[in-house]
Amino acid sequence: MDLFLQPWPWFVAGPLIALCMYLLFYFGKKFGVSSNLETICTIGGAGKFVDSLKLDWRKERWNLIFVVGMIIGGFITNQWLSPDKSIALNPNTVHELEQIGFSNPGAQLLPDEIFSVETLLSTKGFILLLLAGILVGFGSRYAGGCTSGHGIVGLSQLSKESLIAIIGFFIGGIIMTWFVLPLIF
């Protein structure tokens, strides 16, 4: 059981991811979490309004099962396979997070200042969540995929477009972390 209470080394996890990618490629499947949004929108009837969403969603059922498995796996990991909910942060990071309003940074992976129900149901939290959802949805559609799709599949296929997208994701993350996040808090 101790095997599941610590991160696996890269030389175990990496080949397992590569094996999954090979199997998906072999069976002609595409991987990417954002493609599930497309499938869900198609199920919801968005094809009546948007031509690009007139798809046979039944062909992508496996991908929906994959997302359900990710949710269940995350829940199991959080509830039973995580011995300690705190995370080790650099003291400088702790100080900077305290400066912008976080209380007790590093005590838990998902801080209450961002992820509590009260925060999400506040006006500010709702607006931020809505805006973030629109930006992520637009960005992943505009970029032709999400971070997992470009980072795992696109880069493994040596896609120039995926490399450019990943560079853009990192630049956006740096801008968000250093400039936008301090303004929000």
Image (spheres, rainbow, N blue to C red):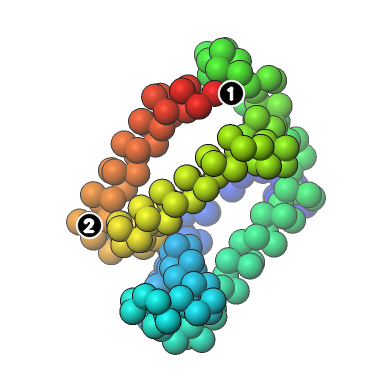
Which residue does the image show at 48% across and 83% down from the upper left? 57
Judging depth in this view, the residue of 182 and 123 nearest the camera is: 123
Judging depth in this view, the residue of 160 and 183 nearest the camera is: 183
Q: Is residue 165 above or below residue 42?
A: above
Residue at the spot of label 1: 89
Q: Secondary structure at mark 1?
A: loop
- The spot of residue 161 in percent (x, y) is 22, 57
Under mark 2, the amino acid is Glu
Which numbered circle lies on residue 153? Answer: none
Q: How many marks?
A: 2
Q: Is residue 91 visible?
A: no
Tell me the quarter of the picture where residue 94 sits: top right
Q: Is residue 98 left or right of residue 150?
A: right
Which residue does the image show at 48% across and 66% down from the upper left? 37
Which numbered circle lies on residue 161? Answer: 2
Measure the alpha-carbon separation of dots 2 and 1: 33 Å
